[in-house]
Amino acid sequence: MNLHQRGSDLINQLKDHVLEVLRSHPDAEPGGNGVLQEEVARGAGLHSMGSAELDHTCEEMLKFLQREGLVERLDGNGQDESKKGWRLCKT
């Protein structure tokens, strides 16, 4: 396996990991209230060191999943960007 393929595999593993965190949280169900990004990052172990880079990684995985139609970002009614929630899409 070349380095490019390994990188793609790692990204897919991270997306699956973040999805697993959302699936295990009752507020992340379709139609639920949503889960804050920082809570998703903590649940995934991507916030434990307080690193902005790891939190950014979680955000990017959520955006990938959003583009794939698996999760949706809640409006938050004008709240701070970091305080908007995420939930699973209805399938």
Image: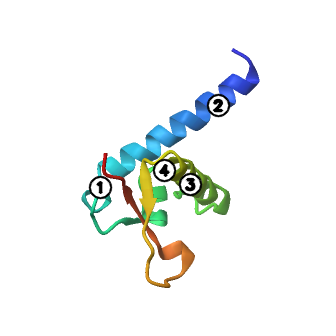
Q: Secondary structure at mark 1?
A: loop
Q: Relative to 71, is 5 on the left or the right?
A: right
Marked residue nearer the N-terminal end (1 or 2): 2
Marked residue nearer the N-terminal end (3 or 1): 1
The residue that mark 1 highlights is 25
Q: Residue 56, relative to residue 36: is it above or below? A: above
The residue that mark 4 highlights is 45
Q: Residues within 10 Å of mark 2 (few under 14, many from 20)?
A: few
Disc 4 to disc 1, how far (Cα)? 15 Å
Residue drawn at point x = 42 percent, y = 69 percent: 74
Outermost residue on the right side: it is 3
Counting from the top left corner in percent of width and height, residue 89 is at: 36, 53
Image disc number at residue 8: 2
Mark closer to the observer (3, 1) = 3
Amino acid type at image mark 2:
Ser
Disc 2 to disc 3, how far (Cα)? 16 Å
Outermost residue on the left side: it is 26
Mark closer to the observer (2, 3) = 3
Residue drawn at point x = 56 percent, y = 54 percent: 63
Amino acid type at image mark 3:
Lys
Amino acid type at image mark 1:
His
Mark closer to the observer (1, 2) = 2
Marked residue nearer the N-terminal end (2 or 3): 2
- Check if mark 3's residue and mark 1's residue have beta carbons within 8 Å: no
Residue drawn at point x = 51 percent, y = 42 percent: 15
Q: Secondary structure at mark 2?
A: helix
Q: Secondary structure at mark 3?
A: helix
The residue that mark 3 highlights is 63
Counting from the top left corner in percent of width and height, residue 10 is at: 60, 33
Amino acid type at image mark 4:
Gly
